[in-house]
Each structure stands twice: as structure tokens, then as C-alpha cells.
Image (tube, rainbow, N blue to C red):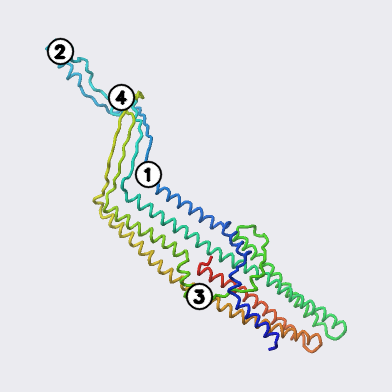
């Protein structure tokens, strides 16, 4: 191995040594795209609307702590139906006449009418303002706490989607860069074969070589054209997917940050540190934790309903009577109430047990997700290490393939190598270039996967 190869490998080592410092200053351009995606993505908009809906549910639960005041006027018209008939006049009028005769006066009325009244009141109004206030109600208190925990869980769910979207945008951007790199590699390779075709044409014209060397070179050019067309199609598809994540026009241009592939990321944290960070920061755990707290509050709600009565005060004031005269029709009613279900066929005991089972389900799910997150971090950690090792290997392979091709190219031009050797080592160099390009992008993607597993923002 010559000195140039040693020098290039040393530069690669220097890159890997300065990885942590360089990656700490993450691409501002990519971060801007991520923020644009977080602002415009339709899935996140749906989650924001869902949070708004749950927030309104919390506001509704809070409203039950305030008194209820209502204005309830009613007016009734009736005709027919049952009547209340009582001959009060027939009973009292003879007695009153006798009393008047005995006393020699007209003190007692003798024209009392019999009662003949419709049971359904006609021309009757009840115009009132009523209020009700819960002094103590376990449903109101615990439902408010439950809605509060569900809101926290919904907010955590949105952050889960944000973390996933951040990863998807990053990987889509890296994949787009890789398609551009592929186009560059194919275009460079086509230039090599075009130069080979011109050289071979001169050799054929000068009767130094036969025609097959020219047709072989042109065949290689046609293969590059076909592969270049596929690469350009992949580039258009990758651009469309990236713009889809940002909710932009699918054909919108994408700015390129070439510095991303110059200093590649490498994890310097220990696996245990990364796992602990993930357990503290992953929003899936916060989401399950909110649901678990809501379930535990539901247990307290059902236990309180089984033991504690609900107390309330209320009342109404207004006018009531026949015709809207408002004279001698005013009234005031005050109420104090207690509700206590003493027995409901063991329904409350069953609800308590059901709520406890739901809490246990969520607690078990939380433990399972914690283990899954630890496994996810472990896999992402070792995937990144393997990607870095693969990158170092492909860098060495690319240097050797390039050096070998340059030697063969020089020999071929001097008539010391066969065309088949030239094509073989050019294809080897092309393969090495692609392997190195894929390895570079794979390091970026694996780092993004580790950041997603650890929930790095």
C-alpha cells in the first residue's frame, strides 16, 4: 500500500475522531426542513385538533364545579281531559244561610260555587329562575382529574408522532441525497466510457485495434444511460416523498447540504446511558403513564361512588299562576338534597374491579414498552456501530479500487492492458463508489434511527 493510501486512511480516521464535535452542530438546513414538516404535516394537524377536542372536554368537566343557573318560563293551554268536581257550594251554602238566620246578619256567603276544575291547567304560567350547585360530587371531582390525565396522554401522543416524523423527514432527505450521489457516480462513469469510446475510435481508425473495442465501449455507454435513467427516476420519487412529508408541492425543489456527508455521526455515549435517556424521554411511556393515571383515578371514582353520598343545594324563584298578571303570584323555593345509592345489585363492586383490571393491563403494557424501548435502543446502537465499521471498510475499498483503475487506465492507453481488464476494474471502481455512497448514507440513517429510539430532539 503506497503513501497516498495511508494518508487517505489517516484522514478518514481524523474524520471519525472529530465526529462528535461536528455532528453537534447539526445541519441548520435539515433542521429547518424538519421544523417546516412539523408545522405543515397533516397527521400532526389532526393530532393538534384532537388535543383541542380533549381540552374542550377538560373545560366541560371543569364547568361542573360552578353553579347552574337557568331561566325556565312555561305557559300552558289546556282543553278537555279529566276534571276535579267537588260540590262544595251545595254543602256550604245551606249551612251559611242557616247561620245568617241565627245571627241575623249576612256574615256568611251563600253563593259559594261548586268546584269544577280541569286537572290540566289552562292559561297557566310558571316563570322562574332556578339554580343548582353541587356541594360534594365525586363524579365531578374525579372526572375532571381523568380528563386532565387524558389530555396529558394526548399531548404525549402528538410528541410521539413528532419524533417519528422527524426521523422520516431526516431519512427521506438522506435518501434524496443518495439518489443525487448515484446520478453523479453514473455520470462520471459515463464520462469515463465516453473517453474510452473516443480513444478506441482513434485506435480503430489507426488500425491499432479492431472494431469490437469500439462497440464494447459504446455498449457500456448505453448501459450507463439506462442506469442513469433509473437513477433519475429514483431521484424524482425521493423528492416527491420528501415533499409529501412536508406537505409541499411534490415537485418543489430541495436545497442540498453537502456538509452532512463530510463529517459523519458516531455515537460516543454508552449503551446504558442511551437506554436510560430513552426511558426518561420517550413519549410513548408518557402517553401510557397518562392513561394509567386516568385509569387509577377511575378506580378511585368508583370506590368513592360506592361509599360517599353526593350533596347539592338548589332552588328557584319566580311567578306562578293563571294569566300573566304577576300579582300575588311570586314564590321562592329552596332545596337541599342528598343522593346515596345503597344497593344496586353489586354493580358498583363490579365497576371497581373492572377499573382495577384496566389499570393492571396498562401497567403491564407500560413494562412491556419499556423493555421494547431498551431493545430498540440496543439494536439502533449496534446498527450505527456496524455502519461506521462498514463505512471505514468501503473507504479503504474505494481507495484501492480507484488506485487499481488508474494503473489499468494508464496501461491500456499505452497498449499494455486488454479492454476486458479495463472494463473489469472500471466496474469494480463503480461498485466501490456505490458501496461507499450507500455506507455514508447508511451511517446518517442509522444515527437518525438511534436519535428516534432515544427521542433526541
From this view, report whether residue 105 is shown above or below residue 344.
above
The answer for how far apart the CA atoms under marks 3 and 1 are is 53 Å
- Judge by depth and name the residue closer to the eye, 330 or 231: 330
- Judge by depth and name the residue closer to the eye, 417 or 323: 323
Counting from the top left corner in percent of width and height, residue 156 is at: 47, 60
Q: How crowded is the residue under tag 3: few (<14 C-alpha within 10 Å), some, or many (20+)? A: some
The answer for how far apart the CA atoms under marks 3 and 4 are is 84 Å
Quadrant of the rendering where the C terminus is positioned: bottom right
For label 2, the residue is: 100
| Location of residue 36 by image quarter | bottom right
Counting from the top left corner in percent of width and height, residue 268 is at: 54, 76
The answer for how far apart the CA atoms under marks 1 and 2 are is 61 Å
Q: Earlier in the sequence, mark 4 or mark 1?
A: 1
Which tag is nearer the camera, tag 2 or tag 4?
Answer: 4
Q: Secondary structure at mark 1?
A: loop
The answer to whether residue 80 is left or right of residue 170 is: left
Q: How crowded is the residue under tag 1: few (<14 C-alpha within 10 Å), some, or many (20+)? A: few
Q: Secondary structure at mark 2?
A: helix
Which tag is nearer the camera, tag 3 or tag 4?
Answer: 4
Quadrant of the rendering where the N terminus is positioned: bottom right
For label 3, the residue is: 379
Q: Is disc 3 in contact with disc 4, using a CB cutoff of under 8 Å?
A: no
Q: In the current view of this chain or complex, which residue is farthest to the top?
A: 104
From this view, report whether residue 396 is shown above or below residue 105.
below
Q: Secondary structure at mark 3?
A: helix
For label 1, the residue is: 66
For label 4, the residue is: 328
Q: Residue drawn at (32%, 45%), measured in percent from left and top?
A: 134
The answer to whether residue 240 is left or right of residue 455 is: right
Q: Residue drawn at (82%, 81%), measured in percent from left and top?
A: 199
Q: Secondary structure at mark 4?
A: loop
Amino acid at each position: 500500500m503506497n503513501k497516498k493510501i495511508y494518508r487517505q486512511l489517516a484522514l478518514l480516521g481524523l474524520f471519525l475522531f472529530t465526529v462528535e464535535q461536528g455532528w453537534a452542530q447539526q445541519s441548520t438546513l435539515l433542521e429547518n426542513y424538519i421544523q417546516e414538516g412539523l408545522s405543515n404535516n397533516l397527521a400532526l394537524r389532526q393530532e393538534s385538533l384532537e388535543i383541542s377536542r380533549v381540552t374542550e372536554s377538560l373545560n366541560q368537566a371543569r364547568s361542573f364545579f360552578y353553579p347552574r343557573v337557568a331561566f325556565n318560563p312555561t305557559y300552558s293551554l289546556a282543553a278537555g281531559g279529566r276534571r276535579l268536581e267537588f260540590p262544595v257550594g251545595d254543602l256550604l251554602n245551606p249551612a251559611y244561610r242557616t247561620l245568617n238566620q241565627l245571627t241575623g246578619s249576612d256574615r256568611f256567603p251563600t253563593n259559594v260555587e261548586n268546584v269544577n276544575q280541569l286537572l290540566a291547567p289552562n292559561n297557566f304560567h310558571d316563570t322562574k329562575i332556578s339554580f343548582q350547585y353541587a356541594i360534594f360530587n365525586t363524579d365531578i371531582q374525579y372526572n375532571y382529574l381523568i380528563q386532565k390525565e387524558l389530555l396529558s396522554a394526548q399531548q404525549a401522543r402528538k410528541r410521539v408522532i413528532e419524533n417519528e416524523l422527524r426521523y422520516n423527514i431526516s431519512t427521506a432527505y438522506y435518501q434524496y441525497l443518495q439518489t443525487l450521489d448515484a446520478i453523479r457516480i453514473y455520470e462520471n462513469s459515463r464520462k469515463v466510457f465516453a473517453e474510452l469510446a473516443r480513444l478506441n475510435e482513434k485506435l480503430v481508425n489507426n488500425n491499432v485495434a479492431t472494431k469490437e473495442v469500439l462497440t464494447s465501449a459504446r455498449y457500456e455507454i448505453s448501459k450507463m444511460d439506462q442506469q442513469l435513467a433509473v437513477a433519475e427516476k429514483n431521484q424524482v420519487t425521493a423528492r416527491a416523498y420528501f415533499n409529501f412529508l412536508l406537505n409541499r408541492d411534490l415537485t418543489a425543489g430541495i436545497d442540498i447540504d453537502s456538509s452532512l456527508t463530510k463529517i459523519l455521526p458516531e455515537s460516543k455515549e454508552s449503551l446504558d446511558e442511551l437506554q436510560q435517556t430513552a426511558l426518561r424521554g420517550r413519549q410513548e411511556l408518557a402517553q401510557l403513564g397518562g392513561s394509567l393515571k386516568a385509569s387509577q383515578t377511575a378506580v378511585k371514582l368508583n370506590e368513592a361512588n360506592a361509599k360517599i353520598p353526593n350533596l347539592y343545594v338548589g332552588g328557584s324563584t319566580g311567578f306562578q299562576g293563571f294569566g300573566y298578571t304577576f300579582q300575588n303570584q311570586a314564590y321562592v323555593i329552596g332545596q337541599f338534597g342528598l343522593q346515596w345509592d345503597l344497593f344496586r345489585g353489586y354493580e358498583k363492586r363490579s365497576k371497581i374491579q373492572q377499573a382495577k383490571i384496566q389499570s393492571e393491563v396498562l401497567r403491564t403494557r407500560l413494562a412491556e414498552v419499556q423493555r421494547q424501548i431498551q431493545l430498540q435502543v440496543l439494536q439502533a446502537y449496534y446498527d450505527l456501530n456496524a455502519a461506521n465499521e462498514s463505512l471505514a471498510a468501503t473507504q479503504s475499498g474505494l481507495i484501492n479500487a480507484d488506485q487499481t483503475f488508474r494503473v489499468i487506465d494508464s496501461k491500456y492507453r499505452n497498449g499494455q492492458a486488454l479492454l476486458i481488464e479495463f472494463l473489469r476494474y472500471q466496474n469494480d471502481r463503480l461498485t466501490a463508489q456505490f458501496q461507499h455512497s450507500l455506507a455514508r448514507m447508511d451511517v446518517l440513517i442509522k444515527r437518525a434511527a438511534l436519535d428516534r429510539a432515544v427521542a433526541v430532539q
